[in-house]
């Protein structure tokens, strides 16, 4: 019972597979999981390459069936922004009728993610400098340099906050424009 969840994590984490994974894989299930996370069809070639080293030929037909089913669940506009907000880029896998909208929403979500990530980096630098400033062994010359750097980082945080507000508004605007509201939830 414990092997199945571990196998799911291993198979969904990357396209390279070990010999035992190649031999025991349910290729429809592998395709389904890849579709559910929006992986491109080129991943199948990676499986073929990895498994051919072990004398195993993945069942492409079953993989494609599963992937198509997974993509049907993935390629819903409601998924686009959350995928971007989680730091996952759209891989051009959805049908033409929603591809552009999916991409726009994903890009807008990713832009918010990117600014938040940058803010986290700056906050990390601030914490590090504040710890150094609090250290009794820090020289006065270094303390002056740290205070200057903290002022610069504070201005950078202000700029990033403004940028984040703008990007969040853009995401909200796109969401309101591209995702129809269901009057009967």
Image (tube, rainbow, N blue to C red):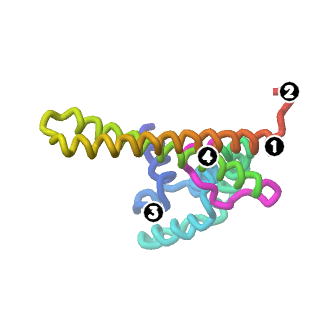
Residue stretch in magenta? 82-98
Looking at marks 2 and 4 on the same chain, the residue that comes earlier in the sequence is marked by 4
Looking at marks 1 and 3 on the same chain, the residue that comes earlier in the sequence is marked by 3
- Describe the element under mark 2 as helix, strand or loop: loop
Residue that carries the numbered disc 2 in the rendered image: 184
Residue that carries the numbered disc 1 in the rendered image: 177
Looking at marks 3 and 4 on the same chain, the residue that comes earlier in the sequence is marked by 3
In this view, the mark in front (1 or 2):
1
Q: CA–CA distance between discs 1 and 3?
A: 39 Å
Q: Which mark is residue 7?
A: none
Looking at marks 4 and 1 on the same chain, the residue that comes earlier in the sequence is marked by 4
Q: Position of residue 49 (x, y in %)?
A: 49, 72
In this view, the mark in front (2 or 4):
4
Looking at marks 3 and 2 on the same chain, the residue that comes earlier in the sequence is marked by 3
Q: CA–CA distance between discs 3 and 2?
A: 44 Å
- Describe the element under mark 4 as helix, strand or loop: helix
Residue that carries the numbered disc 4 in the rendered image: 83
The magenta stretch spans residue 9: no
Instruction: Estimate how packed mark 3 is, as few (under 14), some (14 to 19) or many (20 or more) residues with alpha carbons within 10 Å.
Output: some
């Amino acid at each position: 019972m414990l092997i199945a969840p571990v196998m799911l994590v291993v198979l969904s984490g990357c396209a390279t597979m070990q010999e035992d994974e190649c031999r025991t894989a349910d290729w429809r299930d592998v395709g389904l999981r890849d579709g559910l996370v929006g992986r491109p069809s080129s991943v199948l070639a990676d499986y073929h390459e990895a498994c051919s080293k072990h004398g195993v030929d993945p069942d492409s037909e079953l993989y494609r069936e599963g992937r198509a089913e997974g993509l049907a669940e993935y390629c819903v506009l409601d998924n686009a922004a959350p995928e971007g907000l989680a730091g996952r880029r759209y891989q051009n896998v959805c049908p033409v009728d929603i591809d552009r909208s999916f991409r726009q929403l994903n890009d807008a979500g990713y832009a918010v993610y990117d600014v938040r990530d940058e803010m986290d980096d700056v906050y990390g630098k601030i914490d590090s400098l504040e710890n150094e400033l609090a250290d009794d062994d820090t020289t006065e010359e270094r303390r002056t340099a740290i205070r200057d750097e903290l002022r610069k980082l504070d201005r950078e945080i202000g700029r990033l906050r403004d940028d984040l507000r703008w990007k969040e508004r853009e995401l909200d605007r796109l969401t309101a424009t591209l995702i129809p509201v269901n009057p009967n939830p």
